[in-house]
Image (cartoon, helix red, strand yellow):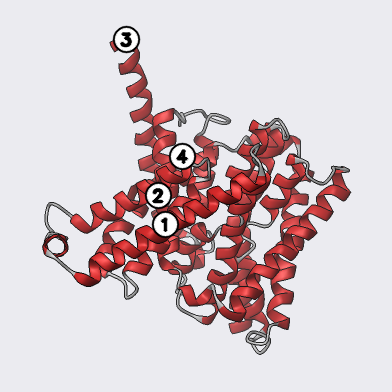
């Protein structure tokens, strides 16, 4: 037993050592690329694919490594939810973003059924349609921050369309890709939302009223106790645990934790943000991207290159085009410069990591083979490189 345990730990720490080396080296490599055209996220995904079990098999994705990867994804969406201003999700712009997603989903379903001959309600077709309509807002956050876009008009629109491009597919997964009755799922989602709201209200009141416990937390926030960081991580893990208990995607719990944190601290907390980003971007989030890349089967992609191209084209058709049209027709956005509208649409066509979750559900249900899932994940990974690149090129060409 002891020998087996030691061997398992050796494999885990060997993989973690390689992953941390990759995470440390990637920023140096990205900095050497002219104009930073290739985001660090893309390099991490490529490294994972090359070093993972489908290629060199240097990085082994054990249960322990997978758990850390899940925590990385949770941190990614915690920070994404925290960055989002509620005003960007409400009003006329919020309604426009919601309608645009439903248009994208209807287009995706129609195209998938026309290409495959699938029937309405088929898990495989539904999963593919959901994958085509996702926006990787969590993945986009560091890219937008690197390029100074957060806080601008373009950044606010990316967050609006992108947030609904993340939340609505998560809800679609829960409603359409589950074996339980739809009414049961609706009740579960409402209960989860109620729990998140209650937690937020209680935490807000705790902070507003103030007492010895709150004063103690503030006083010890920068000490060895790191009380605010511990409380935030507690909030994150608890809501992720609740979502798992309800058989919902963990992304939903992490996103909710970010929203709750923003509600409790609407003005922000620079010290807390720095610490959370240090934990997330310093270790867990790069690990998540490397592990995600390790799940890409390069040989399957080589066997189906045409499918890869088709999926990328479909992403542009069902996500880029509706957003561009919505921006052109919207009362508040029609006056924007055309290249700003194109930039927003390109950024919102970035699609990972939710594709991983969607394809996992479809493969587990036997509605999609692993080779097709690998191609879809690879297309999502390419979109993380291609769409921000096209957005950057568009802006640069116009400026020059």
* Label 2 with label 4: CB-CB less than 8 Å: no
Residue found at x 38% / y 24%:
11
Cα–Cα gap, marks 1 and 3? 42 Å
Q: Which residue is mark 1?
A: 196
Element type where label 2 sits in the image: helix
Q: Image height check: is 163 above or below 333?
A: above
Q: Image height check: is 152 above or below 213?
A: below
Cα–Cα gap, marks 4 and 3? 31 Å
Looking at the picture, tell me which residue is in the foreground, 271 or 312: 271
* Image spot of residue 33 (x, y percent): 49, 60
Q: Which residue is mark 3?
A: 1
Crowd band around label 2 with a 10 angstrom C-alpha radius: few (<14), some (14–19), many (20+): many
In the image, 37: left or right of 239?
A: right
Sequence-first tag of 2 and 4: 2
Q: Between tags 1 and 2, which lies in front?
A: 1
Q: Quadrant of residue 272?
A: bottom left
- Number of numbered discs: 4
Q: Which residue is mark 4?
A: 245
Sequence-first tag of 1 and 3: 3
* Label 1 with label 2: CB-CB less than 8 Å: yes
């Amino acid at each position: 037993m002891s020998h087996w345990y030691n061997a398992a730990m050796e494999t885990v720490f060997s993989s973690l050592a390689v992953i941390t080396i990759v995470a440390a080296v990637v920023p140096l490599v990205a900095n050497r690329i002219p104009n930073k055209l290739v985001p660090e996220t893309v390099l991490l995904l490529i490294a994972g694919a090359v070093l993972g079990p489908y290629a060199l098999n240097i990085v082994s994705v054990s249960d322990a490594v997978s758990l850390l990867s899940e925590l990385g994804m949770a941190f990614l969406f915690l920070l994404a939810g925290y960055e989002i201003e509620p005003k960007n999700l409400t009003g006329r712009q919020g309604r426009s973003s919601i309608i645009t997603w439903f248009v994208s989903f209807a287009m995706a379903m129609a195209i998938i059924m026309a290409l495959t001959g699938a029937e309405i309600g088929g898990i495989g077709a539904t999963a593919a349609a959901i994958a085509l309509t996702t926006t990787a807002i969590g993945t986009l956050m560091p890219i937008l921050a690197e390029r100074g876009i957060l806080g601008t008009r373009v950044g606010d629109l990316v967050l609006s369309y992108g947030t609904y491009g993340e939340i609505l597919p998560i809800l679609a997964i829960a409603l359409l890709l589950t074996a339980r009755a739809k009414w049961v799922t609706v009740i579960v989602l409402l209960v989860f939302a109620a729990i998140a709201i209650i937690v937020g209200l209680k935490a807000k009141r705790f902070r507003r009223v103030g007492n010895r416990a709150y004063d103690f937390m503030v006083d010890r926030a920068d000490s060895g106790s790191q009380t605010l960081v511990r409380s935030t991580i507690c909030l994150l893990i608890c809501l992720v645990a609740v979502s798992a208990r309800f058989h919902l995607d963990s992304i939903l719990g992490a996103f909710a934790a970010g929203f709750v944190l923003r509600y409790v601290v609407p003005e922000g907390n620079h010290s807390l943000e720095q610490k959370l980003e240090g934990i997330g971007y310093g270790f867990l989030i790069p690990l998540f991207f490397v592990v995600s890349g390790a799940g890409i089967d390069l040989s399957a992609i080589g066997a189906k290159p045409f499918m890869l191209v088709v999926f990328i084209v479909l992403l542009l058709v069902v996500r880029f085009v509706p957003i561009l049209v919505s921006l052109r027709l919207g009362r508040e956005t029609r006056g924007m410069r055309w290249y700003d509208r194109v930039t927003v649409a390109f950024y919102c066509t970035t699609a990972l990591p939710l594709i991983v979750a969607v394809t996992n559900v479809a493969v587990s249900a036997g509605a999609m083979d692993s080779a097709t899932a690998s191609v879809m994940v690879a297309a999502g990974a390419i979109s993380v490189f291609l769409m921000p690149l096209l957005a950057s090129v568009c802006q640069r060409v116009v400026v020059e």
